[in-house]
């Protein structure tokens, strides 16, 4: 059986939210048993240009959590990357809609990063772009809150 494709975290420009989400999820997976530990997490953007630097506030927000993403460079979500992905995790419903409308065939496994949280929790993660560090830290914390429910989903999906 071939190894599963990467988990792809997706935002708009791939310089704020999705690199943070990928860093946090990869860090969480590293502490899990196989096969979760071996899953690869990458990030991309629905309107990204290739090679842009990750935002400094994203780097700082994750550094405070002990995770380094300073080497990240942006990439667009291509049809090939989407087809290879075993799972795509988006930040907002508009990202999901854009993927479903622009990729042919549309990928089947597209979820919000916070989709598996209990009812009543906000499922979307707003864009911190251009905001102060505290907004990026709040964004990071929204992602951290979702990690346990994501891990439970992944345990069922990859068991």
Image: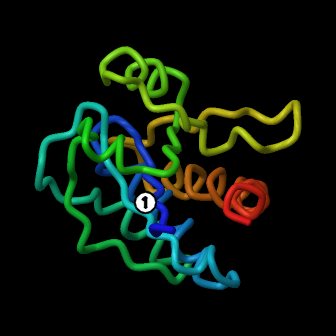
In the current view of this chain or complex, which residue is farthest to the front? 1
Above or below: residue 15 compared with residue 72: above
Residue at figure coordinates x 88%, y 33% from the top left: 119
Give left or right: position of 155 versus 128: right
Determine which quarter of the picture holds residue 100.
top left
Q: Nearer the viewer, residue 8 or 142?
A: 8
Identified at 37% across, 60% down, the residue is 42
**Residue at left offset 45%, top offset 57%:** 133
x and y, in percent, of residue 33 in the image: 70, 84
Number of disc labels: 1
Colour setup of the view:
rainbow
Q: Pointer 1: what residue?
A: 6
Q: Residues within 10 Å of mark 1 (few under 14, many from 20)?
A: some
Q: Is residue 61 left or right of residue 36?
A: left
- Relative to 157, does residue 93 appear above or below in the rendering? above
Residue at the right extreme of this rendering: 119
Left or right of residue 17: residue 14: left
Residue toward you, 103 or 61: 103
Q: Secondary structure at mark 1?
A: loop
Q: Position of residue 93 (x, y in %)?
A: 55, 23
- Residue at 38% x, 20% y: name it: 98
Provide residue 66's location: percent of width, then percent of height: 52, 83
Tell me residue 140's x, y (percent).
56, 57
Query: Which quarter shows the C terminus?
Result: bottom right
Rendering quarter of residue 156: bottom right
């Amino acid at each position: 059986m071939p190894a599963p494709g990467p988990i792809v975290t997706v935002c708009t420009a791939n310089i704020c939210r999705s690199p943070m989400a990928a860093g946090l999820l990869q860090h969480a997976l590293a502490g899990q048993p196989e096969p979760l530990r071996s899953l690869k997490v990458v990030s991309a953007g629905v309107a990204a240009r290739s090679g842009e630097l990750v935002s400094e506030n994203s780097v700082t927000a994750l550094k405070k959590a002990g995770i380094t993403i300073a080497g990240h460079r942006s990439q667009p979500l291509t049809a090939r990357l989407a087809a290879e992905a075993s799972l795509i995790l988006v930040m907002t419903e508009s990202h999901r809609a854009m993927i479903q409308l622009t990729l042919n065939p549309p990928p089947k496994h597209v979820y919000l990063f916070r989709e598996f949280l209990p009812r009543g929790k906000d499922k979307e993660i707003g864009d911190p772009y251009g905001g102060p560090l505290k907004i990026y830290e709040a964004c990071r914390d929204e992602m951290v809150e979702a990690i346990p429910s994501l891990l439970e989903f992944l345990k069922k999906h990859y068991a």
